[in-house]
Amino acid sequence: MIPEFWSQATRELAHRDPVMAELIRSFAGVTLVSRDEPFTTLIRSIVGQQISVKAADSVWRKMRIAFPELAPEEIISAETAELRACGLSARKVEYLVDLARHFLEGRIHVDRWSMMSDAEIVTELTAVRGIGVWTAEMFLIFNQLRPDIWPVDDIGLQKAVARHYGHGERLSRQQLLECGERWRPWRSVATWYLWRSLDPVPVEY
């Protein structure tokens, strides 16, 4: 699914910022796309933490074979050995079980998210073990297609802003927050184009 706001966002960003206008021209025809449903996306985020892309892909393939539906009920009822056999660490098994429990116990309110603020969803998600603010922000950008997320703790974003707006020098956290103000209410879109300037191949979540 492509964000319905993308065309408006790119027009407005290009109009107010010549650097962003050039990035948008450079990557014309490519957009942010959301695919999997929330539970699957969050599982994949946890699986990929602190391991290489290649290793994460291997674990993910095994997970999809072992748990075809990849539903909370499957995860919560699985034996620890079954989950470990997919290549998951003991800690990540605990994280996935806690995530499944949150969904099954109704502590993750997917049906209410459309009425909740970004901050409220981040608070809800970070109550799950293994999900920090960065993971929650990535989820809001890539799964929920929230238009105005500005993940200042993301290393890629920091590098891209330094390259295009800091003459190669990293900005402080406060400077990054101030820099992002120029792109409201489309900071997710600005972030996506800044990432593309470092890695032209879009990440898929």
Image: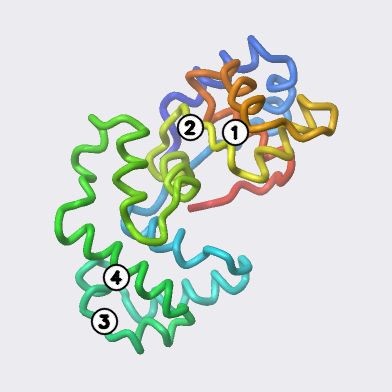
User: Can you identify the residue that label 3 sits on?
Assistant: 78
Residue lying at 63% horizontally and 68% vertically, measured from the top left: 52
User: Can you identify the residue that label 2 sits on?
Assistant: 149
Q: CA distance from mark 1 to mark 2?
A: 8 Å
Q: CA distance from mark 4 to mark 1?
A: 31 Å
Are discs 4 and 1 less than 8 Å apart at CB?
Answer: no
User: Can you identify the residue that label 1 sits on?
Assistant: 191
Mark 2 Cα shell of 10 Å, populated few (<14), some (14-19), many (≥20):
many
Please name the amino acid that badge 4 sits on: Val
Please name the amino acid that badge 2 sits on: Ile
Q: Can you tell which mark lies on residue 145?
A: none
Q: Earlier in the sequence, mark 4 or mark 3?
A: 3
Q: Position of residue 100 (x, y in %)?
A: 26, 65
Which quarter shows the N terminus? top left
Mark 1 Cα shell of 10 Å, populated few (<14), some (14-19), many (≥20):
many
Q: Position of residue 109 (x, y in %)?
A: 20, 45
Mark 4 Cα shell of 10 Å, populated few (<14), some (14-19), many (≥20):
many
